[in-house]
């Protein structure tokens, strides 16, 4: 069985490694070591965001890895406080400057801002400009519902390449996945192994996907871990997934998801775990965090 990591071809022909490495909540002073560990282990796709405060360290890790720039797919996100046409063009300068890169592989809008949707559309028009100018190789969105996508597609020209949304066995968003598929948008899973169901210190009333008995049974049948089963499930269903870990053994574990295949029954069993209940913020909501200011490069 193939052991090379799968890639996805985006709707503009750009190739993206399906499995990326996420750095949300990775403190800046741990980010260089964590991203270096991920690149050394074999990841070739890193997902960061202006709002994570660690783009500078992600860029440093890529440079220090000695890998060719073209061999690492770099994805980052524009935060809401930078929405608007000129503001978002400048947000690109800030992110590219911190990353130390001239061109980004994928730049996405971090959230829809429902009460500032005109600014959200202007931000997307700026992404279209950056794409046309070759400053970014692909553009997309995050946390967009089907209604947000419809409103975006109605008002703009370029279909997003990616929609990054909360997606793990306990919250699968079938209607978002169907809308993405209809428009040729790759669905990218954040919290792909259900991190948001067990973030340390985020309250203990949640049921962790890592403790799920169905996932444990499937994992045992393959001699794998529940995290590996979840990542394999994403890949077999054609999604991109961007697991985060600062722990070298888990970084390697989360990449060791080739060389085995879930059966159709096992995939169906994971599908059946959907509770329909999100753990993360509702994309229809307004958040105080929207006003977080993103520093200059
Ligand atoms: P994940 O599903 O990736 O889970 C991360 C958590 O799981 C961490 O606590 C990590 O701990 C732990 N972990 C990682 N691997 C294993 C393993 N093999 N076994 C047991 N525990 C493990 O959740 P995230 O929410 O971090 O999502 C991943 C990425 O998605 C983020 O880093 C970010 O890039 C993106 N994201 C995007 C959002 C958006 O709004 N667009 C929102 C949230 C996330 P440790 O690090 O201590 O090893």
Image: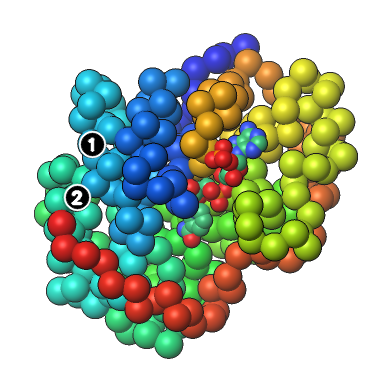
Q: Please give the name of the residue rendered at 60% of the width and 65% of the height, measured from the top-left corner.
A: 280
Task: Tell me the number on the disc at residue 98.
Answer: 2
Q: Residue at x 58, y 57 (%)?
A: 166
Vertical placement of residue 174 versus 259, above or below: below
Q: Is 29 drawn above or below residue 131 in the view shown?
A: above
| Whole-number angstrom distance, CA of label 2 to CA of label 1 | 9 Å
Point out the image quarter for the C terminus.
bottom left
Q: Residue drawn 37% across and 85% down?
A: 116
Does any atom of ligand 1 lie closer than 8 Å to the CB of label 1? no
- Mark 1 neighbour class, 10 Å CA radius: few under 14, some 14 to 19, many 20 or more: some
Point out residue 147 in the picture as x, y percentages from the top left corner: 53, 75
Extreme-bottom residue of the structure: 115
Nearer to us in this view, 228 or 157: 228
Q: Nearer the viewer, residue 58 or 273?
A: 58
Name the side, left or right, on which 222 lies relative to 238: right
Label located before the other in sequence (2 or 1):
1
Residue 51 lies left or right of residue 283; in this view the side is left
Asked whether the viewer can see residue 284, the reply is yes
**Residue in the foreground of this view, choosing between 66 and 135:** 66
Residue 38: x %, y % from top left: 42, 28
Residue 121 visible within the image:
no
Element under disc 2: helix
> In the visual, does 23 lie left or right of 216?
left
Q: Tags 2 and 1 in contact by the CB under 8 Å rule?
A: no
Residue under label 1:
60
Residue 293 at what x, y percent from top left? 28, 72
Task: Identify the residue shown where x is 30% and y is 41%.
Answer: 58
Which quadrant: the N terminus? top right
User: Label 2 crowding class (10 Å Cα cut-off): few <14, some 14-19, many 20+?
Assistant: many
Q: Quadrant of residue 72?
A: top left
The quadrant in which residue 87 appears is bottom left
* Mark 2 C-beta closer than 8 Å to ligand 1: no
């Amino acid at each position: 069985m193939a052991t090379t990591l799968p890639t996805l071809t985006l709707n503009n022909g750009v190739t993206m490694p399906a499995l990326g490495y996420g750095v949300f909540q990775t403190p800046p002073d741990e980010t260089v070591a964590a991203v270096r560990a991920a690149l050394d282990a074999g990841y070739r796709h890193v997902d960061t965001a202006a709002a994570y405060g660690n783009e500078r360290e992600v860029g440093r890790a890529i440079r220090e890895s000695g890998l060719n720039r073209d061999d690492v797919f770099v994805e980052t996100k524009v935060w809401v406080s930078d929405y608007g046409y000129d503001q978002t063009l400048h947000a690109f300068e800030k992110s590219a400057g911190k990353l130390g890169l001239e061109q980004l592989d994928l730049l996405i809008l971090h959230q829809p801002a429902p009460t500032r949707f005109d600014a959200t559309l202007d931000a997307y028009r700026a992404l279209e400009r950056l794409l046309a100018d070759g400053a970014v190789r692909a553009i997309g969105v995050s946390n967009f519902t089907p209604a947000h996508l419809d409103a975006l597609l109605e008002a703009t020209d370029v279909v997003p390449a990616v929609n990054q949304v909360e997606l793990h066995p306990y919250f699968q968003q079938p209607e978002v996945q169907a809308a993405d598929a209809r428009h040729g948008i790759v669905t990218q899973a954040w919290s792909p192994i259900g991190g948001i169901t067990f973030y340390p210190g985020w309250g203990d009333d949640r049921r962790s996907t890592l403790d799920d008995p169905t996932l444990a049974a499937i994992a045992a049948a393959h001699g794998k871990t529940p995290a590996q089963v979840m990542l394999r499930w994403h890949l077999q269903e054609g999604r991109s997934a961007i697991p985060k870990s600062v722990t070298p053994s888990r970084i390697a574990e989360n990449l060791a998801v080739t060389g085995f295949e879930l059966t159709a029954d096992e995939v169906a069993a994971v599908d059946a775990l959907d509770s329909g209940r999100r753990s993360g913020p509702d994309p229809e909501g307004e958040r105080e965090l929207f006003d977080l200011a993103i520093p200059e490069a």
